[in-house]
């Protein structure tokens, strides 16, 4: 675990932070699942710059995603008022990546203990299985992660059990993989986990909308992730922005929609700087106006044309086993989140990269979005390869 990964230094003055916090105002909170803990409708993350963290705390952000990534640099304000914050630890499979790695009770237990030692947080509120299960059968039969949680809970080191769930259907590297909606439906019915994070954005599919309703009816908490779906690159596309409705922005329209027009409990919207915090969070809990509705329509059309949904439906149709969704997920990190270093580091670990694509076209009929996958892979390779 790298200490303080992704957390930039505070660049803004105290006055600028105060002005930003005033512009955003107090964020609404909602219960996260049946336990009734109230969390801000948009949550925070350890990737935020220090000034954004300070402004966020003033506005009432009280749930922090991937807090283990702060390492020994946990913001002082959180350490000082530890019980006012919910800090989540994200735990990966071991001996491999999210596809090949394994669930291992003892390794997860030790990982959390070591993350606590490094961060000094004393306990983690939420212990999250990162990337989730491959299929329902694994969720039902492999209880290693749950057992690690129960041991840590007995010691007072963790409090709530959750998972983030990705899609594994059609993934040739994961035998019998299923999609997130199928797996999460089983998780909700199982009742052991309390809440989940999953990909959810504008133009969402029906199965994911049904899942969110099911979760709400069952008191199961929901946090949307990967919500921006191309919003970062839209902002940098001068032609697109020329036509964009005045008095809103891609991130603000998104925040308004996520927090008022869906049944989600909360959402993560990727931001890094104070200005992005102000732009995005000033939409939280505020109604979608006509300018926002128009903006969302344009954003959906743009994203459907350009941005992979990471659904994985194409994967098993590539005879070369190119991890299309992983490559296009890293492209998102670089293009939409400004996380070039992280994107390149992850890309370098892939055993097959975008330049392996021979443009045979086998995958194309399986992409409901009709993305030009070979073109996207070639472009992603140019962005993500480490230039020698
Ligand atoms: S076009 Fe490229 S990614 Fe698609 S199946 Fe052929 S080699 Fe694989
Ligand atoms: S390229 Fe298309 S089918 Fe493949 S993961 Fe992306 S959206 Fe899904």
Image: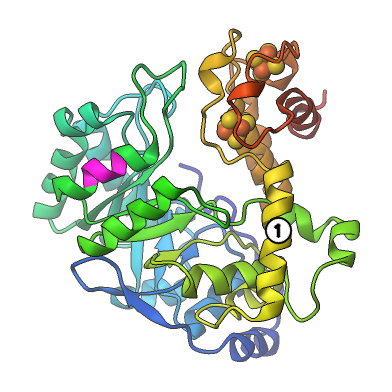
Relative depth, front residue between 242 and 33: 242
The image quadrant where one finds the C terminus is top right
Whether 4 is drawn above or below 15: the answer is above
State the image coordinates of residue 153 (x, y, percent, origin top left). Answer: 14, 53
Q: Residue at x 35, y 63 (%)?
A: 87
Q: Is residue 39 visible?
A: yes
- Magenta residues, start to end: 183-187
Q: Nearer the viewer, residue 207 or 183?
A: 207
Residue count near mark 1 (Cα–Cα under 10 Å), binned few <14, some 14–19, many ≥20? many
Give SS at disc 1.
helix
- Picture coordinates of residue 18, whole percent (x, y): 62, 89
In the rendered view, tell whether residue 62 sits above or below residue 211.
below
Residue at image location 70% in from the left, 15% down from the top: 361
Report the residue marked by disc 1: 299
Q: Residue at 73% of width from left, 26% of height from top?
A: 377
Q: Residue sitting at 61 percent across and 9 percent down?
A: 320
Residue 306 picture quarter: top right
Q: Quadrant of ligand 2?
A: top right
In percent of width and height, residue 379 lies at: 80, 31
Say left or right for 152 vs 334: left
| 187 relative to 345, above or below | below
Q: Quadrant of residue 49?
A: bottom right
Compared to residue 314, the image places residue 152 above or below, namely below
Whether residue 10 is visible, yes or no, is no
């Amino acid at each position: 675990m790298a200490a303080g990964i992704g957390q930039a230094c505070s660049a803004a003055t105290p006055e600028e932070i105060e002005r930003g916090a005033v512009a955003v105002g107090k964020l609404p909170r909602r219960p996260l699942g049946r336990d009734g803990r109230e969390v801000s409708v948009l949550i925070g993350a350890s990737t935020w710059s220090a000034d954004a963290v300070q402004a966020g705390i003033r506005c009432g952000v009280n749930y922090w995603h991937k807090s283990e990534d702060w390492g020994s640099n946990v913001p002082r304000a959180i350490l000082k008022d530890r019980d006012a914050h919910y800090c989540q630890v994200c735990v990966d499979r071991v001996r491999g990546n999210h596809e090949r790695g394994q669930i291992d009770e003892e390794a997860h237990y030790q990982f959390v203990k070591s993350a606590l030692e490094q961060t000094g947080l004393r306990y983690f509120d939420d212990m999250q299985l990162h990337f989730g299960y491959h299929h329902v059968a694994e969720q039902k039969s492999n209880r290693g992660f749950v057992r690690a949680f129960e041991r840590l809970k007995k010691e007072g080191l963790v409090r709530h059990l959750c998972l983030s769930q990705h899609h594994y259907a059609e993934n040739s590297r994961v035998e019998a993989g299923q999609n997130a909606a199928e797996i999460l439906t089983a998780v909700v019915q199982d009742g052991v986990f309390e809440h989940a994070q999953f990909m959810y954005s504008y133009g969402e599919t029906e199965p994911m909308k049904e899942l969110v309703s099911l979760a709400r009816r069952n008191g199961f908490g929901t946090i949307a992730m990967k919500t921006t779906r191309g919003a970062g690159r839209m902002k940098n596309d001068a032609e697109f922005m020329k036509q964009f409705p005045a008095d809103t922005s891609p991130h603000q329209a998104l925040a308004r929609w996520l927090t008022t027009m869906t049944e989600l409990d909360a959402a993560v919207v990727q931001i890094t700087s104070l200005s992005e915090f102000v732009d995005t969070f000033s939409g939280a809990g505020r109604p979608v106006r006509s300018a926002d509705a128009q903006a969302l329509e344009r954003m959906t059309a743009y994203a459907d044309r350009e941005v992979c949904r990471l659904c994985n439906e194409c994967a098993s149709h590539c005879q070369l086993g190119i991890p299309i969704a992983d490559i296009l997920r890293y492209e998102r990190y670089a293009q939409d989140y400004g996380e070039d270093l992280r994107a390149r580091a992850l890309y370098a670990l892939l055993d097959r990269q975008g330049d392996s694509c021979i443009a045979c076209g086998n995958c194309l009929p399986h992409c409901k979005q009709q993305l030009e996958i070979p073109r996207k892979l070639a472009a992603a390779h140019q962005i993500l390869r480490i230039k020698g």
